[in-house]
Amino acid sequence: MKPWTTISLVLLLSLPTLTHAHEISGIVHPHASITEKVAPFLVQLNGGEQTTFVRSDGLFRFRDVAPGHYFVTIPSTELLFSQYDVDVAADGHVQVLEAKYLGAPLIGCEYPLVVEPVKELEYFEPREKFNILGLIMNPSFLTIIVPIGLLYVLPKLTEGMDPEDMKKAQEEMGSTDPSSLLAGMLGGGQANAEDSDDD
């Protein structure tokens, strides 16, 4: 067989492959900037059937893609990217649907893909800022401050009292049985009053 015949045969056999081979491409803007250099994110086609990396200018491309249905994902531990449902027609027309996250409704988007992160992934809760109201309402803070406040306020209140009334109050406090006072605070005072009424 002549050499030119062999070459012609190879070209004829490869023509269907060349005719039906397309590409899926896009650009990644991880920080909504078109000038910042982009990290080499991994881009997967159908969960890893084909993989490629994002170039420093953000571009990525899958070559020699046959007509069909594909899923484009960008796994990352730092950023959450949308997932893309890509249909490549036999004539090379590409139709894309985007899901912001797993289970989200699909929405149409432009092609070539323009990929921006949905959100930055956070694995720790941010430290709360100082909140004076939260400190004041803290029970531990109240148990310390309230007694101190009473120690300051009560002497001020007794300064305006009549000396005779003060002396009488002190005598009553001194003659009061602590157990009966405690019982009265817990509700026993009402029972004692009822007993005295019965008598």
Image (spheres, helix red, strand yellow):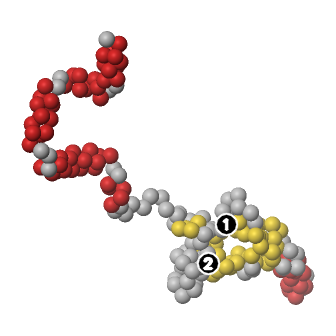
Q: Name the residue under label 2.
A: 28
Circle 1 residues within 10 Å: few <14, some 14–19, many ≥20: some
| Residue 124 pos. (x, y %) | 44, 58
Asked if one can make out residue 7 in the rendered structure from this viewpoint, the answer is yes
Is 168 located above or below residue 75 in the figure? above
Name the image quarter holding residue 147.
Answer: top left
Along the horizontal axis of the image, is 92 left or right of 123? Answer: right
Along the horizontal axis of the image, is 156 left or right of 187? Answer: left
The residue at the point 14 percent across, 50 percent down is 160
Q: Quadrant of the C terminus?
A: top left
The label nearer to you, 1 versus 2, is 1
Which of the pair 66/69 is nearer the observer?
69
The residue at the point 57 percent across, 80 percent down is 32
Q: What element carries label 1?
A: loop
Q: Which mark is residue 100?
A: 1
The residue at the point 81 percent across, 77 percent down is 94
Which of the pair 175/98 is nearer the observer?
175
